[in-house]
Image (cartoon, rainbow, N blue to C red):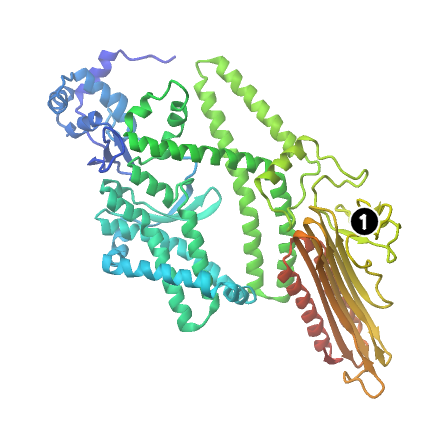
Amino acid sequence: MTTLANPSETRAAASDAPPQLAEGVELLGEMPGSGYRQAPALVRRGDGQTLQLTPLLYGVLEAVDGVRGPAEIATELSEKIGKAASADDVSFLLEKKLRPLGVLIGADGTSPVAPKANPLLALRPRVAVSNPDVTRRLTGPFARLFAWWIAVPMTVAFFVLTGWVLFAKGLGTAAHQAFYEPGLLLAIFGLTVLSAGVHEFGHAAACRYGGATPGTMGFGLYIVFPAFYTDVTDSYRLDRRRRLWVDLGGLYFNAILCVASVALWWATGWDALLLLVGTQVLQMLRQLTPVIRADGYHILADITGVPDLFAHLKPTVLSLWPGNWGNRDSRTLKRWARVVVIVWVLLIVPSLVFALVSGAVALPRLVATAWDSLGVQGHTLAEAAGAGHVPTMLLAALKMLAVALPVAGTLLMLGRVASRTVRSQWAKGADDPRRRVLTVVAVGAIVLVLGWFWWPRQQYTPIGPDERGTVLDLASSVRAASAGAAAPFAGTGVSSGARVPALILVPQDAGNRPALVVLRSSDGGPATVMSVDPGPGAGAGAGPNRWPFPFPPPGPAAPGGSRAVSITTADGTANYDVAFSMVWVTGNDVHTRNDAIALASCTHCTSVAVAFQTVFLLGQDGAGGTGNTLAPINTSQALNYACRDCRTTAVAVQLVVSLTSLPDAATSAQLAEIRKGLDQLSTDLPHLSDAEIYARLKGIEQAILTTLAAAGPTISDS
């Protein structure tokens, strides 16, 4: 049983012991440049949390000295506000308003348990690296960088050099050098991560330059993504101009890093260093978004003088309903600040709703793509581990982490929003059973809708390289999921809009003979073969499935040759074909042929053909003696015809090696193992760029040469 104390007894108990400020509480005064009609006063607790108080509550707190009781405090408060205040009024404000904020010692003399803000988008957990004293000493020398005679030329240099790198020099050679030297790419990645810490150090240095005291620096997790942080809450007591310096301090240090990167490139000639300019610009653009609690959010908050914009989301939305314009929230803000907050809310609410809905709808595709990509990178990691190539192993591991984090972040964010919403609504219904019933019904409805979208049908397919991922594509996914993802071909198991590897077999003489479409099974079962009728008059320009190209279809591969053919004529589809062979030649004449042919006549489509052939010349000296004809042929043909937004790629690699004798059993086994890399390429093809495809083939080629060289029978290669 709970017994409620008599109000007079509560007042008497409070008056017996004069109120005292909790340890570490600082009264900072009125907030400069406030966007409120009545500027709030700031109080900082011992744990570093800064609170906004009304002038009335701040006046009470100013009178608390550990000696005066409620009656004496009431007398002083009456003089400040120009109205009569009683001891009972002061006792109420002390017990019901101030003590719950953790700024007063408890009535029993114990230290208060200070409630801390727990925003949805916050770093948790977080690890402190330096305390305020260390931060203050570290940032002292760097605060000089904000002097105008340094900041102005540095900013000009940033814009000039960044413009030159992005629009004149370009990042092509830098990307090529980094991606083909894993050690350099790892170094760039490490410097980019370190630059995020330098960004936060810039905020701390700007805080010190402005006259405030920077607090703790450290790192934590923003949802699931690693991030650095700096406590600059002391800057709230600065004027608006100096607070904006603190907000821009991180971006300024990013600009200094860009200038330093170009200077280091000029001194060393390493183009890969210029990638740091690109990564810094991207980081600066991300920081400027006002959607999350990044620099752009704090810049907007300090311009308007409204420190916590997210606290005004709900009041502003409610105030926009007819008849609610004069609600409490509209009365507290100045008119111009309220207009800015309304515009921000009108942008932020649709963005957050869209992010949540699109995350929920796209989750099956994200999960499928991440799973497929993890398999590809896992294979790369295993190959690198077998070869003992540490940089490639580390890059593969980082790629796997980069793939897994967005999916984990989406799941965690959806779960966090759902948990908070349900707990909040359930708590509000403590005295209203009908509200709790509505909460249960709403949760059940949402679970049913999400279950409909997430129940495995045909939507768990990886995102293809030809997909654009536009808002309209997302809407199509919603319609497809709502319709049950009906398959356009009976018995194929292929959903509408799905991208699957296929081999198109077109008769050489065309005519009215049907083509065959071979779809590889994703579950390891038998392949699906579909007959596509070319229609009457095919090859002559008639019929819906006519041969669209002004030349005959490609014929089959020559005897002993290798040919990959990919033909795409349907809008929004993707076709891939891989052909590989090992040819052993003992005669004098070599005319072995290796062809890759990719054709496309469609819109938003993909056609990729890859052919790899190894020709072993037994008993040859590689020079082709008298009467010998060594003329291996290697061709690739890629053609777009009446095509829009098409990716058409043909890659043909032919390796010719002269051997004095047949490889032994161990070498043959190694060659067979290398061949598995080509099998894996067939699986990975939809997720690789053209450069990655070629790099994979050249890697396999080098592996063959290395294996043969170690065995000893190789004479020469071409």
Q: How many marks?
A: 1
Q: Which residue is mark 1?
A: 546
**To which quarter of the image does residue 612 belong?**
bottom right
Whole-percent x, y for residue 394 in the image: 55, 60
Q: Is residue 71 above or below residue 710?
A: above
**To which quarter of the image does residue 637 belong?**
bottom right
**Three-letter amino acid code of the residue under disc 1:** Arg
Q: Is residue 480 left or right of residue 171?
A: right
Whole-percent x, y for residue 511 in the image: 88, 53
Task: Determine the residue positioned at 78% across, 70% down.
Answer: 668
Nearest the viewer among 141 and 254 is 254
Task: Determine the residue positioned at 42% across, 39% down.
Answer: 291
- Quadrant where the N terminus is found in the figure: top left
Residue 118 visible: no
Whole-percent x, y for residue 629 in the image: 82, 81
Whole-percent x, y for residue 120 in the image: 43, 35
Task: Determine the residue positioned at 54% across, 51% down.
Answer: 402
Task: Determine the residue positioned at 20% across, 25% down.
Answer: 56
Q: Is residue 49 above or below residue 55?
A: below
Dot 1 surroundings within 10 Å: few (below 14), some, or many (20 or more)?
many
Q: Is residue 600 left or right of residue 30?
A: right
